[in-house]
Amino acid sequence: MKTEAPKEICTMKRTLTPFITVLLLAASLGALPSAHAQAPETGAESTGPKPKTGTAPIQFGYRPEGMTMWDPWFVAHEGQVHLFHLQRLAGRSKRTAAEADHIGHATSRDLIHWTEQPLTVGPGEKGGMEDMQPWTGCAVVKDGVFHLFYTMRSSRDDARNQHIGLATSRDLVNWQRHPGNPVITPDPRWYVHEGKPEPDNKVGCRDLKVIRDPAGNGWIGFFAATVPAEEEAEAACIALARSKDLIHWEQFPPAFAPKRYGEVEAHDVFPLGGKWWMTCLTSHGHGNRGIFADPNVVRGTIVAVADKPEGPYREPVPGYALLGGDLTAGNTVSTVEFEGKRYAIFQEGSRLSPPLELNVTPEGRLRMMWSDRQNAWRGASLLPDKLPQPVSIRTHVTGGVTAGKWELAADGSYCGKSRTGWQVADLGFGSADMEVEATVTLKSGIAAGLVLRGDRSAPSPRGDFVFALDAQDGCVFGASLTMFSPMNRRQFKVEPNHAYHLRLCARGDRYQLYVDGELILHGAFPKEFVRPQPGLGLFVDRGETIIEKLAVYQQTPSPAKAANSK
């Protein structure tokens, strides 16, 4: 959990590495728990640094001032959402290493605008059981008191043995560690433990997620652990525990034991559509590859489902990635129920993603969908009053002949045809940060889609970036032109003569592509993709397409709102 680069975090975090997450749990001090609420028995008060409330404007996604963040988790309370997350110093940061070692906290009333709040729990007494940066956990509110669970780590064993700790607060500023920490260590009846650790003396016990038992029998907890096994991929599991008071826990056999992943962690558990769902992060970096249903995914959030909150959880489709892709893709999905909907938010690079709505298809598939809350970033329309004529540009840098042609039809649709190669049309307008909506119908052939042009004055698309529906390979892809490399892609069945609604959001150095409202592709643009004179283009590959109902909006950065701290 101590590295800024998500790909490194993910590969290491078995028992002593960073969980890849984001920031997502915060609340302004105006909605703090009542002063008369009774906290459980606690120990010494946290004395970590407490920076000033508020943060500088952050472009397209929250992160605390001077920090990068990962592994977010949330709790909604009294009309606000509290985000908690791990963090480290950003480049040229003016903040201190001591601050970076604390769990961060922010709040929001709309899941878009976040306000940084005072830090929460940091390392404990030097030489003790938790003298290193605390790792991922969860937060719940009981009788008006915030209970913050976190992963305890100690320098005396190089963080090889993990435990679950607890801190509480009445005011979200002063935190008291529970004097009996740790509150959870692995039960030898079911899990690898200190008496019989893994071969390298590691004991996993982290990422606790706590929910209320809907039957009224206290609380149910889920934490990442391992069971005794001959090989690594047979050992990873999500352990199960129960408590009446959030302090004393009784453990049970695993809630989820897939026996096919080198690691499952950074999990969440929630009800939706009459079922209980569990999401877990895993990757090829944990010792086994080819684990995802989509061979294009190297790191992703998998999905399991159960009829009861305690499980057992089973994957409806082994290796189905709710969120995933290449190493630039977002990770560590965490959810929150807010204003009647279940939202998913994840770590997107070094900051927080926008909220996405979760739903379940009639076939029982969990999906992440576009949320209109993102309209907060929508600025003025960039579409000219009169639709521009498409300009077919040379696909080869030195060639003088185009591979096909584009036309603007009388009904306002763009028609592209190319028999022998791929062809890009330039529309003559655009912006570096923009949201593009269009309906794309591949009438015949290989592929069709949208192009982000780096320089619309350039006579060829070299250096542009294309997003396309590919019928031949059954995928959606994003790729640099003209070599189509690097390429990020996800499996997706593309049918001829079917109208697909595409929504492309290009914000800063990252993109999200939605197909019929579902997030299908996301990641980071290559560093080589520069936009001195950005523009919008259209794409067709060895076929015929119609692209219509075009809408284009400027995307505007969202600063934190002062109203969030009132």
Image (spheres, rainbow, N blue to C red):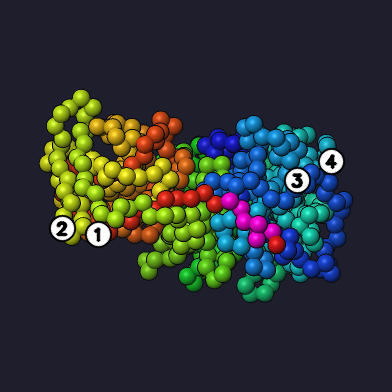
> Residues at badges 2 and 4 in contact (C-beta under 8 Å)?
no
Q: Quadrant of residue 112?
A: bottom right
- The answer to whether residue 330 is above or below residue 109 is above
Q: Mark yes or no: residue 308 visible.
A: no
Q: Which sits in the foreground, 44 or 365?
A: 44
Give the magenta part as a residue range: 559-565
Q: Mark yes or no: residue 158 visible.
A: yes
Mark 1, Cα crowd under 10 Å, few <14 / some 14-19 / many 20+, is some
Q: Which residue is mark 2?
A: 410
Of marks 3 and 4, which one's residue comes earlier in the chain?
3
Q: CA distance from mark 3 to mark 4?
A: 21 Å
The spot of residue 473 in percent (x, y) is 26, 45
The spot of residue 466 in percent (x, y) is 31, 41
Three-letter amino acid code at the position of disc 1 = Ala
- The answer to whether residue 223 is above or below residue 276 is above
Q: Secondary structure at mark 2?
A: loop
Q: Which residue: 39% across, 66% down?
A: 361
In the image, farthest residue toward the top:
398
Q: CA distance from mark 2 to mark 3?
A: 60 Å
Mark 3, Cα crowd under 10 Å, few <14 / some 14-19 / many 20+, is few
Q: Depth-wise, is mark 2 or mark 4 nearer the camera?
A: 2
Q: Secondary structure at mark 1?
A: strand
The spot of residue 280 in percent (x, y) is 53, 52
Q: Which residue is mark 4?
A: 125
Quadrant where the N terminus is found in the figure: top right
Q: CA distance from mark 2 to mark 4?
A: 74 Å
Q: Secondary structure at mark 3?
A: loop
Q: Which residue is mark 3?
A: 51
Q: Depth-wise, is mark 2 or mark 3 nearer the camera?
A: 2
Q: Which residue is mark 1?
A: 499
